[in-house]
Amino acid sequence: IVTVNSTTTQTVSVASDLTSMQDAIQGFLDKFNAVQDLIDANTRISVTGGTVTTAVLSDNREVQGWASRLRALAFDAISGLGGTVQRLDNVFIDFDSTSGHLTIKDSDKLATALNEHPDDVQAFFLKPGTGMVSKMFSYLTTVISADRAQQTRLSEASSDLDDQIATLQARLEEERTQLTTAFIQMLDAQSAAQSQSQTLTSAFFSKNNNDN
């Protein structure tokens, strides 16, 4: 709301909100780095004192590929821009050599770029379809969709496997029952044979004693 309190000429100054723009850029970098850290934590293979420790997705090349693709998108130039900002390094943002995180290399030069070329910075990040944020969002949407589809397939496969296990367990239980019954019958037959043997032995010795 602009309030005019006199009939004289009024001058309205419009300036960029530098702090808000810097916060928004830092928020984008923080979220990008958080995704990279999450992927790294779940695919890491570490060796300590000869002991190899793996994470739950250490052998999943697809998930590792997500991190590589996101880094490639961060390095790419944005096509169709005619201003002074076409890459992240034009606003003095690059990967840190130790952590691998995207970081602001020179905050003063970034502030200068925001002050002198705010429209160029905005177009770089927010141009519909091809801006940095749009490209990242499009890729992550595709990844999430593919991941959900894969989870559905794995869940279905797991359910099928559970059914197969249940069928196999029922079959094994049936065979166990049959074997148990057969074993009992064998014991009964063995007992009967022993009884008959004892009867025959007794009869044989009794006949021999009578003959003598």
Image: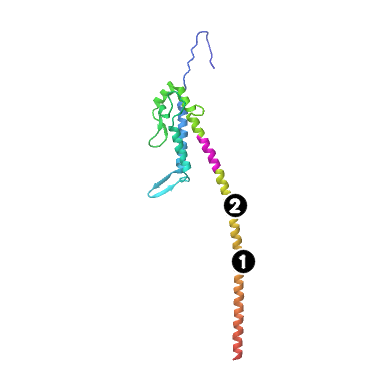
Magenta part, dominant SS: helix
Nearest the eye: 20 or 145: 145
**Residues at marks 1 and 2, CA–CA distance in whole angstroms:** 27 Å
| Quadrant including the N terminus | top right
Q: Say which residue label 1 marks.
A: 181
Query: Is 27 left, or right, of 156 in this rendering?
Result: left
Position of residue 45 measured from the top left corner of the image (x, y, whole percent): 42, 45
Task: Residue 146: say if magenta.
Answer: yes
The residue positioned farthest toward the front in the image shown:
80
Three-letter code, disc 2 = Asp
Count the numbered circles shown: 2
Give the numbered dot on residue 201: none
For the point 49% across and 30% down, the residue is 133
Within 10 Å of disc 2 (Cα), the crowding (few <14, some 14-19, many 20+) is few
Nearest the eye: 130 or 205: 130
Within 10 Å of disc 1 (Cα), the crowding (few <14, some 14-19, many 20+) is few
Three-letter code, disc 1 = Thr
Position of residue 140 measured from the top left corner of the image (x, y, whole percent): 51, 36
Task: Residue 121: say if magenta.
Answer: no
Position of residue 129 measured from the top left corner of the image (x, y, whole percent): 51, 29
Q: Is residue 94 above or below residue 59?
A: above
For the point 53% across and 40% down, the residue is 146
Q: Say which residue label 2 marks.
A: 163
Q: Which residues are magenta?
A: 139-150
For the point 43% across and 48% down, the residue is 53
Q: Is residue 20 visible?
A: no
| Quadrant including the C terminus | bottom right
Q: What SS does tag 1 mark?
A: helix
The residue positioned farthest toward the top in the image shown:
7
Work out whether mark 1 precedes mark 2 in sequence or the reverse, and give the earlier one. 2
Nearest the eye: 7 or 68: 68
